[in-house]
């Protein structure tokens, strides 16, 4: 049987459908290619080729952390934690330790760019902090603060370690000290055990990083024991006047000592 | 006569005679007739002291005001007594032994200080109030006898010295004088020469440290260090792995692991002193010898807390701020066959503060 | 006479037969001392020295001046089994294992700080009132020497416990010695018996601190006081006061009671400080270790100016031939040398410049010698900039200022602030002088406003003495304080009662005398004048 030749002017319905279908197929193919290509290219930009997006098997913690991250951290630290020039460093590899320390002490989110981020009222609750930390850990890995009692270390050994590694910046009693050009080694008074561990482990800003092979977990616990014990023990000689050494002592002798004695001699002696 | 009548009379006496009149020294039989107050004034006049004004605080004895003042002063002394009792009780009975858990012993020293202060202040305030409220108000004038000694004394003293000098004969006996000078001078040397036992010749201790080739870098606990024990951006204090190395005061060294991206511009001749991203510098500050210690890992500055000298690790520990004038000496390090850090030799320049003989 | 009196009489008799000192005793008891309040600052120094001797003797029975190493086994748990010198361990023993040891130790250290502070304000009082002028230059020199000895004594004393803070200071001292040209290394090896720290230094500092320097200080204090007794104390100009007398109170009993009471009060303040303010907590610093240091390391306050000069002096190292002149030499050896030499020579410099060879027993009010006062203010401001720079890292940390900025503030301040202080002080002195003369001329402001018939308001002034035909006072300024308030009038020479504020006795109220006849008439409403 012979089909009538298709008219040049009116393509058959089937032909139109075929054209539409092939067009859609072509478009779909292009989209898939571009999409895969983009994803491959984007994921190639991250070290180790880690996938930036969360995996379907990630925990609830990590997902919640990701949401929080995208709300409050992404502007300075980037979509895939790669950091943004002149705003924030990369968070790949910093680990839960760093994130926990920075966020629970309120240092992050930082209020403005300055010589050093200071402790302030934290923006997130402890649960939220753990979530953000879990997310960052899941993306880039890094050191993790262990659980358990972070204070059961040898007290005297902790003191020796503290004096050789920490006192030069933080002062013999952890009262803080000046670093160059506006930076500061802060007072350790408000720090909790976990914060101390996290700081030692992650080396925030200009603080050196004390890895677990340099100062072992036992040694870190010893240091924390020493710092917290010092904080809790009252001064046996009266008021510690800041535990800052001879400077407040000099102020006291002049203001209180000489002051009281000048008042006394004004009382005893005649005026001119 | 009564004390008060007597003092009334001697006041009249002094008013009549004038406060700066000179009085002949009272002879003994006059003294027998004087009251203590009059005799005191006479004696004061002997010392050139004229009592211009002396008035009882309470001319009428037994007033309520006087009794109040006396009670107030007495109370101060009683306060001392009470405070000493309290001090003693606290000293004997209060807890004072150090305890890690119970802070009650920390009250011991403050309470002792407080009670001691109250006891002493009681006497102090009491004595001052006694003088101000109960003792007579007095104003006295004493003559000064300043200036040169009387001419007689000056001349006779000079004459005595000159005559004595002439007696020694040293003026004309030049042999004796010279020999005496020699001997006495030598005596002075005798006092000084034994002090030579203190003198020690400055030796190589100033220019060398215990570091030698092959010695391991160990931490405060004596543990040797491997690369990889330290994270990037960290600082460890290391010592030479020899007996006594941990205590040698010129040996402490800073082992620094640089951050990725941080590089060191080494001094000429020291290009191979570091090992990969590790560098080692003497911890003893070249300004005044404190351990330099404060490492800012991001800026690469090593800050000394004593006088705020700052050394830049990327410039091979060159001083960039503060009073230090020399870079921290660098220790050449490498890794031995077992994978531990070792020194390649001693520091090639004296560590620590500069001194005169240092080129 | 009671038995007791005759016993005292007999005892005195026995002594006098042997010593014949009755006249001498009377002379000393009758000595007159002026009692202006500012004359008691030297006493603070004397009493704090006595307190130092007493508490120091106590401490010396427990302290072990040995650098031998020992493992700690006392009560202070955080240092358990830590290796330390015996000196440090014995200091911990005094602080934790001797009942009451800590309070005595703290009183000792506070008294040391007070000793230096008291000597400083005493020296300033001498300076600003011109008490150092002839014939008292020798005492001024002795005083400067006493301050130097005090600095040395204090440094030696706080270095004895061999703790981390003072050991760091000792290290800096050794570097200062090293920085001296030619003899530096020899001096260093001599003092430490070898390389730093060696095993000798604590023992040597101990003998210096308990025997040599206190001995020198005692002798100097004795001579210092003997000279004051011999030359008699100076006094401010005032009524009845001349260059040839001393107006005041006799030592026994009135002045002595006040002085004794003051001793007790100085001791009381020291005891209070020793109890309620902790000082030098060596257990927190840890034992000295040359590899360790604390942030915020400072010496005791009186060495602070040297700490400051070391911090702000630039890193100018000089190389001469094959030798080095380190930068530490200038701020720590040359600068204090110049400062103390200038201070010691000042009386002679001023005498030469003012061509003043007369004897002076009357003091000068600071405003009346503006050049000297301004020079003193300049020196003081120089010292203060250095002192503050000594604590610049604590200031930077506590007030959130850049550490580098504080160093620069010190560097620039030490040059700029003293001349500014000179200018300001000079103008203030002149202003005060002018005001004195203005009050002498125009009288004291009474605060009473009067309206003249012409409508003008004037304030009534109370003249201080006779006035000339223009109503201006003819009294000359005589060097004494000019009364400037109504309640000070006629009080020159009389003590003002009241401590925090002058207590004025209310003026007597005159009872009106009433005529009974007059009263009855007035009450009845009749005219008061019966003859009207």
Image: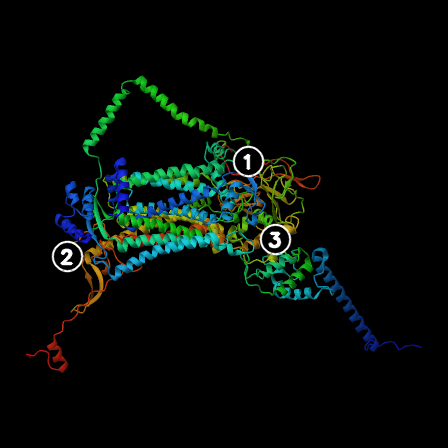
- The residue positioned farthest toward the right in the image shown: A1
Label 3 lies in what chain?
A: A
Mark 3 neighbour density, 10 Å: few (under 14) some (14–19) many (20 or more): many
Answer left or right for C298 relative to C462.
right
Mark 2 neighbour density, 10 Å: few (under 14) some (14–19) many (20 or more): some
Say which of B275 and B20 sits in front: B20
Q: Is residue B246 above or below residue A53?
A: above
Evaluate whether label 3 is on the same chain as label 2: no
Residue A59, labelled with which disc?
none
Check the picture and name the quadrant holding the C terminus of chain C: bottom left
Answer left or right for B37 relative to A94.
left
The answer for how far apart the CA atoms under marks 1 and 2 are is: 80 Å
Q: Is residue C8 above or below residue C275?
A: above
Residue linked to disc 2: C467
Residue A200, labelled with which disc?
3
- The residue positioned farthest toward the front in the image shown: C3
The answer for how far apart the CA atoms under marks 3 and 1 are is: 33 Å
Element at label 3: helix
Q: Splitting the image into 4 quarters, where does residue B174 fall?
A: top left
Element at label 2: loop
Residue linked to disc 1: B350
Q: Where residue A23 sits in the image (x, y, percent)? A: 78, 71
Say which of B219 and C417 sits in front: B219
Label 2 lies in what chain?
A: C
Q: Where residue A35 sits in the image (x, y, percent)? A: 74, 64
Evaluate whether label 3 is on the same chain as label 1: no
Q: Splitting the image into 4 quarters, where does residue B291 fall?
A: top right
In this view, the mark in front (3 or 1) = 3
- The answer to whether the residue labelled 3 contacts the one labelled 2, judged by CB atoms less than 8 Å apart, is no
Say which of A26 and C465 sits in front: C465
């Amino acid at each position: 049987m012979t089909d009538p030749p298709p008219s040049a002017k009116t393509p058959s319905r089937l032909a139109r459908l075929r054209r539409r279908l092939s067009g859609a197929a072509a478009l779909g193919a292009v989209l898939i290619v571009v999409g895969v290509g983009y994803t491959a290219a984007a994921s190639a930009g991250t070290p180790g080729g880690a996938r930036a997006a969360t995996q379907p098997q990630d925990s609830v913690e990590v997902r919640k952390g990701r949401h929080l991250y995208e709300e409050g951290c992404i502007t300075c630290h980037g979509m895939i934690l790669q950091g943004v020039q002149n705003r924030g460093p990369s968070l790949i590899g910093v680990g839960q330790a760093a994130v926990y320390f920075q966020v629970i002490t309120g240092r992050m989110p930082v209020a403005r760019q300055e010589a050093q981020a200071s402790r302030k009222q934290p923006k997130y609750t402890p649960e939220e902090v753990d979530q953000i930390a879990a997310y960052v850990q899941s993306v880039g890995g890094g050191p993790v603060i262990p659980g358990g009692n972070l204070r059961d270390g040898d007290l005297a050994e902790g003191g020796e370690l503290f004096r050789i590694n920490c006192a030069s910046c933080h002062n013999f009693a952890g009262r803080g000290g000046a670093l160059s050009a506006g930076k500061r080694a802060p007072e350790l008074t408000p720090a909790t055990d976990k914060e101390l561990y996290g700081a030692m482990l992650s080396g925030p800003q200009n603080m050196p990083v004390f890895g677990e092979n340099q100062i072992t977990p036992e040694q870190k616990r010893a240091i924390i024991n020493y710092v917290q014990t010092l904080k809790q023990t009252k001064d046996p000689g009266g008021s510690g006047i800041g535990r800052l050494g001879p400077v407040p002592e000099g102020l006291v002798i002049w203001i209180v000592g000489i002051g009281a004695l000048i008042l006394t001699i004004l009382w005893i002696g005649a005026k001119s | 006569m009564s004390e008060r009548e007597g003092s009334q009379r001697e006041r009249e006496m002094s008013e009549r005679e004038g406060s700066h009149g000179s009085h002949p020294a009272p002879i003994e039989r006059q003294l027998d007739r004087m009251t203590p107050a009059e005799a005191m004034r006479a004696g004061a006049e002997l010392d050139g002291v004229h009592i211009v004004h002396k008035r009882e605080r309470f001319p009428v004895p037994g007033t309520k005001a006087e009794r109040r003042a006396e009670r107030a002063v007495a109370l101060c002394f009683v306060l001392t007594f009470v405070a000493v009792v309290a001090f003693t009780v606290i000293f004997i009975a209060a807890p004072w032994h150090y305890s890690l858990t119970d802070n009650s012993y920390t009250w011991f020293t403050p309470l002792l200080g407080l009670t001691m202060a109250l006891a002493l202040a009681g006497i102090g305030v009491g004595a001052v109030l006694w003088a101000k409220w109960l003792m007579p108000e007095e104003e006295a004038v004493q003559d000064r006898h300043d200036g040169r000694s009387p001419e007689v004394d000056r001349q006779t003293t000079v004459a005595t010295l000159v005559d004595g000098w002439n007696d020694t004969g040293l003026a004309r006996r030049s042999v004796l004088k010279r020999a005496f000078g020699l001997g006495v001078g030598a005596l002075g040397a005798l006092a000084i020469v034994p002090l030579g036992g203190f003198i020690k010749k400055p030796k190589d201790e100033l220019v060398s440290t215990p570091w030698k080739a092959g010695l391991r870098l160990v931490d405060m606990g004596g543990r040797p260090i491997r690369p990889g024990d330290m994270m990037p951006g960290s600082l460890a204090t290391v010592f030479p792995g020899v007996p006594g190395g941990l205590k040698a005061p010129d040996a402490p060294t800073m082992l620094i692991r640089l951050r990725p991206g941080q590089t060191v511009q080494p001094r000429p001749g020291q290009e191979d002193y570091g090992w990969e991203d590790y560098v080692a510098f003497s911890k003893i500050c070249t300004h005044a010898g404190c351990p330099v210690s404060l490492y800012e890992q991001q800026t690469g500055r090593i800050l000394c807390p004593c006088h705020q000298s700052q050394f830049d690790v990327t410039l091979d520990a060159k001083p960039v701020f503060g009073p230090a004038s020399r870079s921290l000496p660098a220790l050449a390090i490498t890794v031995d066959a077992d994978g531990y850090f070792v020194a390649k030799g001693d520091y090639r320049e004296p560590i620590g503060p500069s001194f005169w003989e240092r080129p | 006479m009671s038995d007791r009196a005759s016993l005292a009489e007999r005892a005195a008799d026995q002594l006098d037969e042997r010593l014949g000192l009755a006249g001498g005793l009377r002379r000393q008891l009758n000595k007159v001392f002026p009692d202006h309040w500012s004359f008691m600052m030297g006493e603070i120094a004397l009493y704090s020295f006595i307190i130092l001797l007493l508490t120091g003797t106590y401490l010396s029975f427990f302290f072990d001046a040995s650098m031998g190493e020992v493992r700690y086994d006392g009560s202070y748990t955080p240092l358990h089994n830590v290796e330390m010198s015996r000196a440090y361990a014995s200091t911990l023993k005094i602080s934790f294992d001797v009942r009451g040891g800590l309070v005595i130790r703290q009183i000792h250290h506070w008294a040391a700080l007070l000793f230096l502070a008291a000597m400083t304000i005493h020296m300033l009082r001498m300076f600003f009132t011109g008490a150092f002028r002839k014939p008292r230059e020798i005492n001024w020199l002795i005083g400067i020497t006493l301050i130097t000895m005090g600095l040395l004594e204090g440094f030696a004393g706080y270095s004895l416990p061999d703790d981390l803070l003072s050991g760091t200071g000792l290290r800096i001292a050794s570097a200062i010695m090293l920085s001296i040209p030619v003899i530096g290394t020899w001096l260093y090896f001599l003092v430490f018996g070898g390389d730093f720290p060696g095993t000798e230094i604590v023992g040597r500092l101990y003998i210096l601190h308990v025997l040599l320097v206190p001995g020198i200080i005692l002798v100097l204090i004795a001579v210092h006081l003997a000279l004051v007794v011999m030359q008699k104390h100076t006094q401010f100009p005032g009524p009845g006061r001349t260059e040839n007398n001393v107006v005041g109170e006799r030592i026994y009993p009135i002045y002595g009671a006040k002085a004794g009471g003051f001793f007790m009060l100085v001791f009381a303040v020291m005891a209070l400080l020793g109890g309620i303010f902790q000082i030098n907590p060596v257990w927190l610093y840890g034992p000295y270790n040359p590899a360790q240091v604390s942030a915020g390391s400072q010496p005791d306050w009186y060495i602070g100016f040297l700490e400051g000069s070391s911090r702000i002096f630039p890193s100018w190292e000089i190389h001469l031939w094959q030798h080095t002149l380190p930068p530490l030499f200038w701020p720590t050896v040359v600068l204090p040398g110049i400062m103390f030499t200038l201070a010691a020579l000042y009386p002679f410099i001023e005498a030469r410049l003012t061509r003043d060879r007369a004897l002076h027993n009357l003091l000068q009010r600071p405003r009346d010698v503006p050049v000297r006062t301004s020079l003193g203010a300049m020196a003081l401001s120089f010292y203060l900039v250095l002192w503050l720079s000594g604590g610049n890292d604590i200031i930077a940390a506590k007030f959130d200022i850049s550490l580098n900025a504080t160093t620069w503030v010190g560097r620039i301040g030490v040059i700029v602030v003293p001349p500014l202080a000179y200018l300001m002080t000079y103008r203030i002195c002149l202003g005060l002088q002018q005001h004195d003369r203005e009050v002498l001329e125009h009288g004291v402001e009474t605060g009473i406003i009067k309206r003249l018939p012409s409508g003008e308001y004037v304030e009534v002034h109370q003249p201080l003495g006779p006035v000339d035909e223009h109503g201006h006072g003819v009294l000359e300024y005589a060097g004494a304080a000019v009364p400037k308030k109504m309640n000070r009038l006629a009080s020159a020479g009389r003590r003002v009662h009241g401590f925090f504020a002058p207590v004025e006795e209310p003026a007597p109220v005159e009872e009106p005398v009433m005529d009974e006849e007059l009263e009855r008439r007035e009450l009845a409403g009749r005219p008061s004048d019966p003859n009207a």
